[in-house]
Amino acid sequence: MRISKLLMPTLREDPSDAEVISHKLLVRAGLIQKTAVGIYNYLPFGYRVIRKVENIIRAEMNRAGAQEVLLPAVVPAELWRESGRWAKYGKELLRFKDRKEAEYCLGPTHEEVITALARAFVHSYKQLPLNLYQIQTKFRDELRPRFGLMRGREFIMKDAYSFHATQESLDAEYQNMRETYCRIFAACGLQYKVVQADSGNIGGSVSQEFMVLAENGEDALLACPQCAYSANVEAAVSAPPDSRIVAAAQEAVREVSTPDKKTIEEVSVFLKTPPENLLKTLVYYYKVNEKENHIVVLLRGCDQLNEVKLKNYLQADLILPAEDSAVVKITGVEPGFCGPVGLKNVRIIADELVKTISSGVTGANKKDTHLLNVAPGRDFELKETADLRLAQAGEKCPHCGAPLQAIRGIEVGHIFKLGTKYSEAMQAVYLDQNGAAKPFIMGCYGIGVGRTAAAAVEQHFDANGIVWPPALAPYHCVVIPANVQESAQMITAEKIYQELLAAGVEVLLDDREERIGVKLKDMELIGISSRVVIGKALAEGKVEFRLRSSADNELLPADSAAQTILARLQA
């Protein structure tokens, strides 16, 4: 391809709305362009990268025995009502009506559509197992779209769904997909980690995320350096600390004045007691199947609530910190002075480590007042306890006891064991060996195509621009005559270009009437894998060759340059 014919709108300055390196470089390199908030055009170089990611995915999914389909982007509300998600999914689901007032949504995910498809055509256990996948545009109306392709509203996704007659069959396919994903991300040239995850709105009993490791990753992870354990902080657990439950306090509870001391830190300093000896009292609103309620959550003062764990424990569709007015109604006091002692007519749940407090401090449900010598189980009941806290770096691995380390990553893939959540709700059944109707046991497997490309940039860049892994680079070589007005340079450039083209190399010819410095900066910014410069060295029968990942130029004989370059690229 001749660059003079290409749409290549490179920029010298970072876009004003870009926060992370991938967003900055993808826009500056002319690979993407914003159409609206969270919605992007893929320009020629960018779409080549996207297609390469897709082709790697497609090759490995086909190799794994999955079959490609294409499902509609517009989904009728009836299917979502069958699954029960129409009312539960939230505002991320973009809903609309057609001219006949029928309700639809833009599919953010396709469990309902694929389940209805299997219900229509798969009737016997003899047709199972079955794995169907698609690569398609999705839409989620994110509250805060940001980071370019990393969290957009419209995005390209590969989603696959498997159907099984037995749990053992699902387990086998789940492992098959896990291995397939490992091959996909390895083929993309990415450093990644497989971590335990929360299943979120998709549902299911087991799920794992594939995280590309990057300093600017939006996800916080905890990983054990000694064993294989790693998890998203939403799902991470740690071994209980070495704190022992001692005998309950013998001293009676007494009030103490704490004027304007509301936060854990303020109370801890004022009363000269460590945060782990304080009882943190939070009030949360939650909704389950359209029923609304409030709950009081107790933690040690040194711990943070993991809202995902609380939501999963309550099996809630939605949880939110309660409004101040609700806190006052339940506890009789504004936030900051709440406590469990004397609370009535409200459900209370405590994190398991609250039991390690023997003589603690908590709010007195009275303004500017706290209670001392509070003993859980003596001064208030502990009817419900669960693991509700965020695990933290430095705490012990739940498997081997080594200190957990904090790392950051970018989620590019997620695999789920769905079970019968959708098939039971939608009455999608097959006949088993005995002729009995049974719901499909399902799995779900997703990859963010654009996110994978963006994650590759987050992991592979330098001060000059993108350094694509070879498998994802939009082109593998660019031939650059330093001066297109020099006929000898153009003849040599044309010869090398044609020879590389004939050999199957994805090659560009930079035939623009631009300064050599401009040409080199553009190619480094875009991340073309290698370059051949035909300049002053041609007087000695040489051309300059350099890999994008290297700082060193190599002089090659002009007559055999194409063959040498081909060997370098193949290596």
Image (spheres, rainbow, N blue to C red):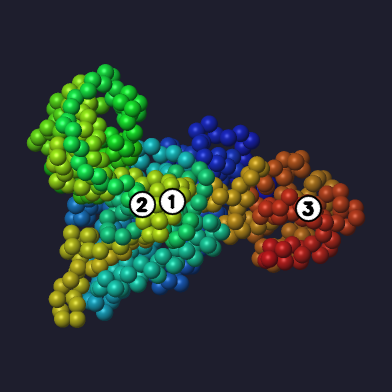
Expressed as whole percent of the image width and height from the top left, the position of residue 147 reads 47, 40
Residue 329 in the image, given as x and y percentages of width and height: 14, 27
Classed neighbour count for the residue bearing mark 3: other residues with Cα under 10 Å, few (<14), some (14–19), many (≥20): some
Classify residue 168 by image quadrant: bottom left
Classify the position of the C terminus by image quarter: bottom right
Distance between the alpha carbons at the discs numbered 1 and 3: 43 Å
* Most distant residue in the top direction: 259
- Closer to us: 441 or 248: 248
User: Residue beneath label 1, please?
Assistant: 404
Disc nearest the viewer among 3 and 2: 2
Mark 1 and mark 2 residues within 8 Å of each other at the beta carbon? yes
Of the image marks 1 and 2, the number of the one nearer the N terminus: 2
- Nearer the observer: mark 1 or 3; the answer is 1
Tell me the tag on residue 238: 2
Q: In the image, is residue 145 above or below residue 42?
A: above
Q: Residues within 10 Å of mark 2 (few under 14, many from 20)?
A: many
Q: Which mark is residue 553?
A: 3
